[in-house]
Image (tube, grey):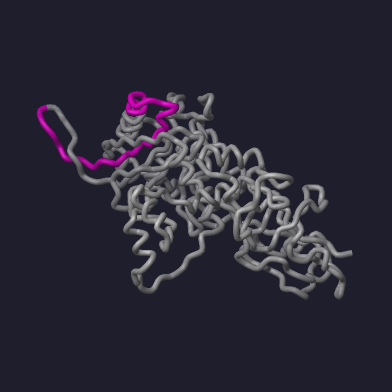
């Protein structure tokens, strides 16, 4: 009897994944437990094993396709066995293995589907649509029977750009197309952008599909900007102690301590005393945490990943350094476990290796704060009787003004600056 190879359920919030690579070809012999393909989520790359031995009879998705969770990707069985009941549109199975819906391998309905009757809109999709001002009736549903589900609303949000009044007037006359993003503030589409789409020769361009991790990052960044009241404040910290301590550890080959490790250590200690920033905003309540689970942004070939250093406030500098290096390596190798990516109470993102001194980091909701670390540059610092030029490190704190006000945020940023400035004076 033919056995389906399905896309596994990797978490309660993951509805689909990207088929990254086939490791077995159609017609090839497969052993039970042998790797058939690799799938990719916004978090990591996972290997999918064959549930049975036999011949890989047919693929239902090709590399690069988006696959729904529990979707049948291929079938293993005996040569010549009938698999028409698994053929595209491919089955999607329930957690227990019973068919519950069908969808095409890479097809998305071309137009809107009605939201009345049996299809309708899922409650989570309806709530998300309301919060983003989207009419779910204009969204193509990819759920069971054409039902509009949360990922459909997220997809619509990710591609929709805000329009200026002049743009709306120009569109009303017809004959113009709206680009995915405009030249105005925050990607706002201006009337001149419509003219450019309609007639200008833009020259050669490489088309890069937005899918997999990039697609998820795009949706989450847009959601962050649209659903939170973000304010960013900037400061600098005296980096002389930081650099001196780094040089001391650099001479010891057994302690591979970086500037980032030292900053994470300093931030974790301040957060342990700053519950209003070490918190989640949940709309009708705020959760202030005693434990510090520190997210650290990592730039990887697949995009931005944010693994979590758990209980960072209890870890020594050496332990934080070891965990930082482990998580960064796993992120770059695409081998982060789902548990490595969840539960952060605050995030630090570091652009210190670039020329950027301060910037505007985006929040990772429901967190209420994210700290950006800039490069170290010479700058003025007050001293008794005048000023002196010393190395300073740039700090940028973005906070959700719905959850915390400006003064306590400024106090927190000042405490972080003081902790970094004094890091060479403490026993670590």
**Residue under the point 43% across and 25% down:** 274
**Residue under the point 37% across and 52% down:** 169
| Residue 314 at x, y percent in the picture | 51, 31
Quadrant (top left, top right, bottom left, bottom right) of the C terminus: top left
Q: Is residue 422 above or below residue 11?
A: above
Magenta-tinted stretch: 385-411
| Residue 265 at x, y percent in the picture | 43, 36
Which quadrant holds residue 173? bottom left
Q: Is residue 251 left or right of residue 207?
A: left
**Residue under the point 64% across and 46% down:** 149
Q: Is residue 277 above or below residue 10?
A: above
Q: Is residue 63 above or below residue 213?
A: below
**Camera-side residue: 125 or 38?**
125
Whether the magenta-drawn stretch holds residue 220 is answered as no
Q: Is residue 381 left or right of residue 411?
A: left
Quadrant (top left, top right, bottom left, bottom right) of the N terminus: bottom right
Q: Is residue 387 left or right of residue 87?
A: left
| Residue 424 at x, y percent in the picture | 33, 35
Q: Is residue 159 left or right of residue 27?
A: left
Tell me if residue 169 can be seen: yes
Tell me if residue 287 can be seen: no
Instruction: Kindly give the residue lying farthest to the left in the view shown.
Output: 385
**Camera-side residue: 222 or 353?**
222
**Camera-side residue: 208 or 163?**
163
Whether the magenta-drawn stretch holds residue 386 is answered as yes
Q: How many marks?
A: 0
Which quadrant holds residue 102? bottom right
| Residue 40 at x, y percent in the picture | 61, 57
């Amino acid at each position: 009897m033919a056995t389906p190879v399905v896309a596994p359920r990797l978490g309660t919030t993951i509805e689909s994944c990207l088929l990254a690579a086939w490791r077995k070809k159609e017609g090839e012999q497969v052993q039970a437990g042998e790797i058939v393909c690799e799938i990719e989520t916004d978090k990591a790359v996972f290997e999918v094993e064959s549930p049975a031995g036999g011949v890989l009879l047919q693929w239902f998705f090709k590399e690069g396709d988006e696959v729904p969770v529990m979707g049948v990707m291929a079938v293993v069985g005996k040569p010549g066995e009938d698999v028409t009941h698994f053929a595209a549109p491919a089955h999607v199975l329930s957690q227990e293995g019973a068919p519950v819906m069908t969808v095409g391998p890479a097809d998305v309905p071309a137009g809107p589907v009605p939201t009345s009757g049996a299809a309708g809109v899922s409650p989570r999709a309806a709530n998300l649509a309301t919060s983003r001002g989207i009419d779910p009736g204009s969204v193509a549903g990819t759920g069971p029977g054409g039902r509009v589900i949360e990922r459909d609303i997220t997809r619509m949000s990710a591609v929709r750009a805000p329009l200026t009044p002049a743009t709306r007037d120009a569109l009303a006359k017809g004959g113009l197309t709206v680009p995915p993003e405009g030249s105005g503030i925050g990607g706002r589409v201006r009337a001149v952008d419509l003219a450019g789409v309609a007639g200008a020769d833009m020259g050669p361009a490489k088309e890069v599909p937005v899918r997999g991790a990039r697609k998820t990052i795009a949706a989450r960044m847009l959601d962050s900007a649209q659903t939170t009241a973000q304010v960013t404040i900037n400061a600098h910290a005296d980096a002389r102690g930081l650099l001196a301590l780094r040089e001391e550890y650099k001479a010891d080959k057994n302690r591979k301590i970086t500037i980032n490790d030292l900053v994470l250590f300093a931030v974790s200690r301040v957060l342990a005393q700053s519950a209003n920033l070490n918190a989640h905003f949940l709309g009708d309540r705020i959760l202030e945490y005693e434990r510090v689970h520190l997210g650290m942004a990592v730039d990887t070939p697949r995009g931005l990943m944010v693994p979590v250093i758990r209980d960072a406030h209890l870890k020594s500098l050496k332990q934080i350094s070891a965990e930082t290096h482990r998580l960064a390596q796993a992120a770059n190798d695409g081998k982060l476990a789902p548990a490595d990516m969840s539960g952060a109470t605050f995030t630090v993102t570091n652009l210190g290796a670039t020329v950027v001194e301060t910037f505007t980091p985006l929040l990772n909701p429901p967190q209420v704060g994210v700290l950006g670390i800039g490069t170290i540059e010479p700058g003025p610092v007050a001293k008794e009787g005048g000023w002196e030029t010393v190395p300073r490190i740039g700090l940028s704190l973005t906070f959700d003004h719905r959850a915390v006000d400006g003064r306590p945020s400024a106090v927190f940023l000042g405490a972080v600056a003081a902790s970094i400035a004094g890091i060479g004076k403490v026993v670590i």
